[in-house]
Amino acid sequence: MDTYKFILFDLDGTLSDPKVGITKSVQYALHRMGIDEPAVDKLDGFIGPPLQVSFKEHFHFNEVDTQKAIDLYRERFKEKGMFENKLYPHISSLLKLLQEQEFTLIVATSKPTVFAEQILKHFKIEKYFDLVVGSELDGTRAGKTQIIQYILDYYQEHRRSDFVMIGDREHDIIGANNTGIASIGVTYGYGSYDELRQSNPTNIVESVEELKGFLMGTG
């Protein structure tokens, strides 16, 4: 097994389950724009990808309406939504173990950095991460390829073979492939096994425990 030194974690669907906060915030934005979507399960596709992508793909919004929807979403999300969230079981102990084993842990998320940092503090896991990289509030650096490349540039003295991206959606895996680093797809989040497999990850795991075994060389 390859030995990695830098472990990049997606946030939504990988470290935590943000379904309630994200889907309710999407519902709020849509309602304010005259669209009612009572079935939150139909909004699971918003978990993971940049909002700019999701509002366009799912509701065919133009640029102006997409930005309006994002602004409305954030009205609710920054007040309530980011805290309607829960860590997946065993995540805290995994992060503690990895830090003790001297891995460098990094958050790589399409969520705005300022929100990601508040969520990590809310769960009291910010101490495990050397760096948190997300999008900007103006929508720039929202794609996973850009986010991962920013991290690689930050640690430019290290080889790409030292890095691995862990995430639950195809965007995480595609970003890793585009930047030439390894990837691990996790099926306990919001991406299906087929979605992950088709995006060609280095490995796929089904649970946090399996992920721990793999990273520690015992899986």
Image (spheres, rainbow, N blue to C red):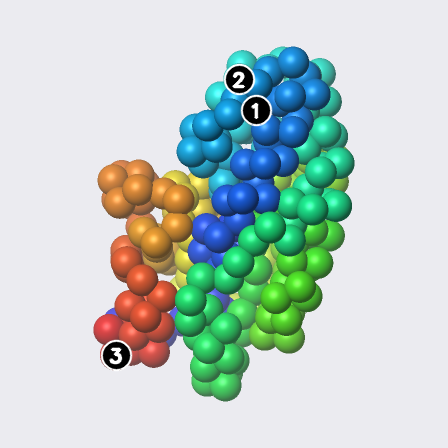
Element on which disc 3 rests: loop
Q: Earlier in the sequence, mark 1 or mark 3?
A: 1
Q: Earlier in the sequence, mark 2 or mark 3?
A: 2
Q: Amino acid at mark 2?
A: Phe
> Residue at image x 60%, y 70%?
125
User: Is 154 left, or right, of 46 in this rendering?
Assistant: right
The image position of residue 2, as x and y in percent, is 31, 70
Q: Amino acid at mark 3?
A: Thr
Label 2, label 3: how far apart the Cα atoms are: 44 Å
User: Quick one: label 1, few (<14), some, or many (20+) residues within 10 Å?
Assistant: many
**Along the line of sight, which residue is nearer the eye, 31 or 87?**
31
Check the picture and name the quadrant holding the C terminus: bottom left
> Residue at image x 68%, y 17%?
33
Q: State if disc 3 and disc 2 touch (CB < 8 Å).
A: no
Q: State if disc 1 and disc 2 touch (CB < 8 Å).
A: yes
Marking on residue 55: 1
User: Is 69 left, or right, of 98 in this rendering?
Assistant: right
Q: Amino acid at mark 1?
A: Phe
Q: What residue is disc 2 on?
A: 59
Check the picture and name the quadrant holding the N terminus: bottom left
Q: What residue is disc 3 on?
A: 218
> Residue at image x 53%, y 49%?
18
Residue 192 can be seen, yes or no: yes
Q: Taking 135 as reference, is 1 above or below it?
A: below
User: Is 112 left, or right, of 88 in this rendering?
Assistant: right
Q: State if disc 3 and disc 1 touch (CB < 8 Å).
A: no
